[in-house]
Amino acid sequence: MPLAVGSKAPDFTLKSKAADGLKDVTLSANFGQKQTVLLFFPLAYTGVCTQEMCDVTSGLSAYAGLGADVIAISVDSPFAQEAWAKANAITVTLVSDLNKSVTKAYDVLFPMLAGVGDTSARAAFVIGKDGVIKYAEQTATPKDLPNFAAVKAALTKG
């Protein structure tokens, strides 16, 4: 079960691949500034994850229009994320939770995905400007996508 609505969102700083190397992405940098949509996904280079991130990429302006930043988190390395993003024209901010600390902090660890190992489950959180979780969802299976209409509805409530 993911962290509950009304909980304080665990802060984190994770690595993202940038043109000039690795950069830090810190959740609390948005506090007081804008809302944040956190999207946990199992693995780069898989069909459902690619579809999800391509769909989110095509709708990034809608999230920006709702005053939100989108950060997608997986247990892939930032280098694998970068190659996947380039291959699929994904422009969502991708951050690496290689050691699974943030996945565990949000209680969305998916054990032994396809018998390969532990990954992030597919999950969505809306974090308010105040750092409090306004929406939380973990999908029933990794093949299911989050309810993006509900995510956007939570953003409109601000």
Image (tube, rainbow, N blue to C red):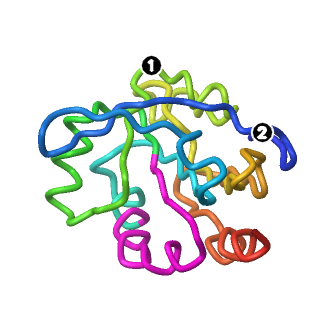
Q: Nearer the viewer, residue 127 or 99?
A: 127
Q: Main secondary structure of the magenta part?
A: helix
**Snapshot quadrant of residue 28:** top right
Q: Which residues are magenta?
A: 52-72
Label drawn at residue 23: none
Earlier residue among tags 1 and 2: 2
Residue 75 in the image, given as x and y percentages of width and height: 41, 32
Left or right of 84, for residue 102: right
Amino acid type of disc 1?
Asn
Identify the residue shown where x is 52% and y is 73%.
63
Q: Residue at x 78, y 39 (%)?
A: 3
Element type where label 1 sits in the image: loop
Q: Is residue 146 above or below residue 58?
A: above
**Which residue position is annotated with label 2?**
3
Q: Secondary structure at mark 2?
A: loop
Q: Is residue 97 left or right of residue 45?
A: right
The quarter of the displayed image where residue 23 is located? top left
Residue located 43% across and 78% down the image: 61
